[in-house]
Amino acid sequence: MSGMTEDFAAARRTMVVSQLRPEGVTDVAVLAAMAKVPREDHVPDVLRPMAYMDRSQLIDGAPMMAPAELGRLLSEIAPEIGERALVIGGGGEYSAAILASIGLTVDRSASLHERLTGHYDVILIEGAVPEIPAALVDRLSGTGRIGAAILDRGVARLSIGRRNGQHVGFRSVADAQVPLLPGSVPDPSFQF
């Protein structure tokens, strides 16, 4: 088993050097956390050999973002020790562990539309969404940031939103291949 542990540790180091840094992941705390937190512990056993591949995985039908995409969003969000974070999505166990490793208090929600109380400094949506619900934006603190892959004409774009008074302005940082977050698109109904 120690050989397997060493292989995963080497894969983590390689992920940082060959996936994260070239994709613009520059936040020192994010890089350190992603170098330390074992991604393989947050996937089913059958996916462990592929844990460090730079592609999204589906965990029980819910997306787990590729390392570079997750790292880029987190780097742009710039999480800080002591902040409160919310991770949305069924595959977000790894990203929650990354934020906790940095020193944030982390809550998780499987649903984009779950009723929430309180405010968050950081909200991370683990999966592509057509839009950010206003009720979720209302949960951002005064200096809150939200990171998500927002669908724009069929393309998922990694986007960062920052609160400015009563409004949140979004900017796109990169295109991505992030699977759709289950439940983020209303079921089509029959209409005339």
Image (tube, rainbow, N blue to C red):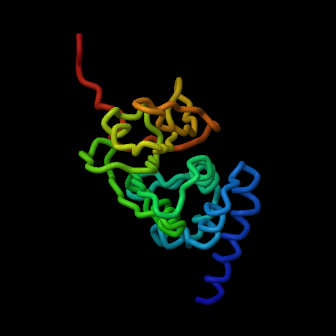
The answer to which of 80 and 48 lies nearer the viewer is: 80
- Horizontal and vertical percent for residue 191? 23, 15
- The residue positioned 34% from the left and 43% from the top of the image is 139
The answer to which of 80 and 53 lies nearer the viewer is: 80
- From this view, report whether residue 83 is shown above or below residue 158: below
Q: Quadrant of the N terminus?
A: bottom right
- Horizontal and vertical percent for residue 142? 42, 42
- Horizontal and vertical percent for residue 96? 45, 62
Left or right, 106 with respect to 159, comes to left
Can residue 61 be seen here? The reply is no
- Horizontal and vertical percent for residue 28? 67, 61
- From this view, report whether residue 125 is shown above or below residue 92: above
- The residue positioned 51% from the left and 55% from the top of the image is 57
The answer to which of 55 and 161 lies nearer the viewer is: 161
- From this view, report whether residue 186 is shown above or below residue 103: above
- The residue positioned 71% from the left and 75% from the top of the image is 10
Q: Quadrant of residue 54?
A: bottom right
Left or right, 46 with respect to 181, comes to right
